[in-house]
Image: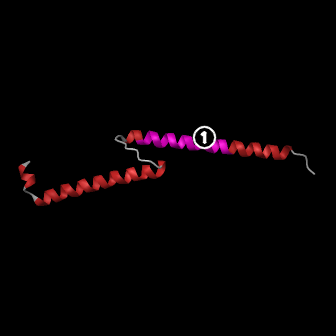
């Protein structure tokens, strides 16, 4: 361990790795913030995948509701007598 502290190249490499990991984490959190408009901290990638899957399911349900609403509007239009 003491040898590492006396090796400036090793310290620079360790610091660069730390910065790159920190930047990757910041980018992931920024992406999550953009998706959800709030900051959520994830420590487990499985949790992130579950949230993304849950969001996709929610989006599909909303799309189905919109489609059903459009179908109902079309039925109402088609049921009106022609003039």
Kindly report the secondary structure that dominates the magenta region of the rendered protein.
Answer: helix
**As rendered, which of 13 and 69 lies closer to the eye?**
69
Note whether 44 is above or below 25 in the view shown. above
Q: Is residue 62 left or right of residue 7?
A: right
Rendered residue at 46%/41% (across/down):
51
Decide whether residue 51 is among the magenta residues. yes
Residue 24, given in percent of the width and then of the height, sits at: 33, 53
Decide whether residue 57 is among the magenta residues. yes
Residue at the extreme right of the image, as rendered: 83
Rendered residue at 35%/53% (across/down):
26
| Colouring style | secondary structure
Label 1 Cα neighbours within 10 Å, binned few <14 / some 14-19 / many ≥20: few
Q: Which residue is mark 1?
A: 61
Rendered residue at 80%/43% (across/down):
75
SS class of the residue under badge 1?
helix
Residue at the extreme front of the image, as rendered: 38
Residue 30, given in percent of the width and then of the height, sits at: 40, 53
Residue 42, given in percent of the width and then of the height, sits at: 37, 42
Number of marks drawn: 1
Q: Is residue 31 left or right of residue 62?
A: left
Q: Quadrant of residue 72?
A: top right
Rendered residue at 9%/57% (across/down):
7
Residue 54, given in percent of the width and then of the height, sits at: 50, 39
Which residues fall within the magenta stretch? 48-66
Q: Is residue 28 left or right of residue 59?
A: left
Q: Is residue 72 left or right of residue 16?
A: right
**As rendered, which of 35 and 38 lies closer to the eye?**
38
């Amino acid at each position: 361990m003491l040898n590492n502290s006396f090796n400036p190249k090793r310290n620079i490499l360790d610091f660069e790795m730390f910065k790159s990991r920190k930047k990757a984490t910041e980018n992931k959190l920024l992406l999550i913030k953009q998706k959800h408009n709030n900051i959520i901290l994830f420590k487990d990638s499985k949790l992130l995948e579950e949230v993304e899957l849950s969001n996709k399911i929610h989006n599909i349900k909303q799309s189905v509701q919109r489609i059903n609403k459009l179908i109902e509007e079309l039925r109402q239009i088609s049921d009106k007598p022609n003039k």
